[in-house]
Image: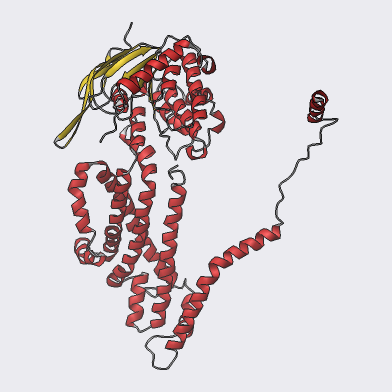
Amino acid sequence: MNMPATKMDIETATPAGPAAPVVAMTPKRPPRSETYARMARETAVRVIPPLVVVALLALVWELICRRAGSALPPPSKVFKDTKELILDPFFDHGGIDKGLFWHLSASLQRVALGYSLSAVAGIALGVLVGQSVWAMRGLDPLFQVLRTIPPLAWLPLSLAAFRDGQPSAIFVIFITSIWPIIINTAVGVRNIPQDYRNVAAVVQLNPLEFFGKIMIPAAAPYIFTGLRIGIGLSWLAIVAAEMLIGGVGIGFFIWDAWNSSHISEIILALFYVGIIGFVLDRLIAGLGKIVTRGTAQN
Amino acid sequence: MTAYLKLDHIDKIFTRGAASTEVLKDISLTIEKGEYVSIIGHSGCGKSTLLNIIAGLTGATTGGVLLENREVNSPGPDRAVVFQNHSLLPWLTVYENVRLGVDKVFARTKSRAERDAWVMHNLNLVQMAHAKDKRPSEVSGGMKQRVGIARALAMEPKVLLLDEPFGALDALTRAHLQDSVMALHQKLGNTILMITHDVDEAVLLSDRIVMMTNGPSARIGEVLEVPLARPRKRLELATNTTYLKCRQRVLEFLYERHRFVEAA
């Protein structure tokens, strides 16, 4: 009885007749409208909560400052007072009577210059301190003391040295933002895994190649943490420095507005300062994300 | 017997503050050209330290390493290392990782196109050419180790140093990679020195097995010849009496005479 049964098994196991046609299946793609709807939903989830909070805050502010005799203007008045500045940021009546665009761009130029210098010098010093034990022993205590000096405390000294507002402001940016860059770079360099150093040693990379091919990519996440803190600090420092040195710049614009009792203009300027600080921070963070794409440990 | 690689009375003492520990004591060994030698011992016996000394990554306290009768005391591509944890640079692709060494070693002797072809040739040897544009994080552990081997081979080392190259891999991948290394050794005739703690791996791959005693002050306890013809087949060896005898000898050494004593 066993035999036929086995035979039958074999027969059923072998494919009978023509094989079933192979149908190429394309993965089902959701209709385009659906993807858009989902994207819109995701954006809404991110955008709506902060908008609601801002609207509520504005409402509270309006209610508090609305009554006559209040020291600060309500948002409606701020908008009414500064409408011209908002709508035409590009006017230039000579001197410091310029649109907000020019003030902001002057400040940004100072920051760009001071910050670039501090990025280059900070990474170089950080590499030195991270790489050499003696450099660390000699320089680290110095850095730890110098970095606690408030930005504006440097200003009189740099004015004395440079005898001009412009380079003094740039120096203040430089000296403010360099410390976190040095310290983070040094930590990053010190934390390069021994494995990578061994690889470099076996391949016999020279110091320059080691710097470019191993050290910078390996320390990049740390370096960018330093750069990000640095850009934040330099934007903090520039407004304060410009208040003192005068000339075109958002800091002096605020000071000037205070002297002329244009409180609404101060509020508008603060709004711009905040937005630009945020954008700068995101810019460096985004750059870091691109540069350190491959560095993440696996 | 011509000494191609010679370890000459190597002692290694680590000093930390006032305390010093002697890790290796009087290690002498000669390795012929084309030979496959394994160093086996319990963990902590200093086998990795010994490999680092040969690679030039660590200095010996006394004694030295001679390669073709010349003393070597700094790292170089003539003693390429395959590291235990692959040590590929995560920001470079598979191709770029191999290319890094090739560009340095053959900077003057090979043109750009030749170097490119040489990288691809070595990736082909380890069957990784298909993944040349992937980053290390995108390939499996076994594949990473293959790339590590390709990177070392591409430097055309006089001695290939393998530091527990299969230790971090699962058993099946390990067997597969061992076969690959055997085939490469057969094909290219490299001189290979491998650190391992796997008895089967040592017997299967080696011409000689160097057994180390437990540290501190680890010495070479015994050197065993493995008189098995090549090419060796894993399955056939499973019942081969010579294989089993060699395996027995190593096991006896490791688990009877020099049993690993857990530090109290």
Q: Furthest-top residue in view?
A: B1
The image position of residue B218, as x and y in percent, is 25, 23
Q: How many discs mark residues in the rendered view?
A: 0
The image position of residue B106, as x and y in percent, is 41, 23
Left or right side of B107 for A189: left
Q: How is the image coloured?
A: secondary structure
| Residue drawn 48% across the image and 40% down it | B137
Nearer-the-camera pick, B223 or A129: B223
In the rendered image, the quadrant that contains the N terminus of chain A is: top right
Q: Furthest-front residue in view?
A: A1
Query: Is any part of residue A150 visible from this angle?
Result: yes
| Residue drawn 49% across the image and 76% down it | A54
Left or right side of B80 for B119: right
Left or right side of A278 for B172: right
Nearer-the-camera pick, B216 or A208: B216
| Residue drawn 41% across the image and 20% down it | B202
Question: Residue A10, located in which quarter of the rendered image?
Answer: top right
The image position of residue A210, as x and y in percent, is 34, 36
Q: Furthest-right residue in view?
A: A17
Query: Is any part of residue A77 visible from this angle?
Result: no
Q: Furthest-left residue in view?
A: B18
The image position of residue A32, as x and y in percent, is 70, 57
Question: Residue A250, located in which quarter of the rendered image?
Answer: bottom left
In the rendered image, the quadrant that contains the C terminus of chain A is: top left
Position of residue A30 relative to residue A205, above or below, is below
Position of residue A135 relative to residue A102, above or below, is above
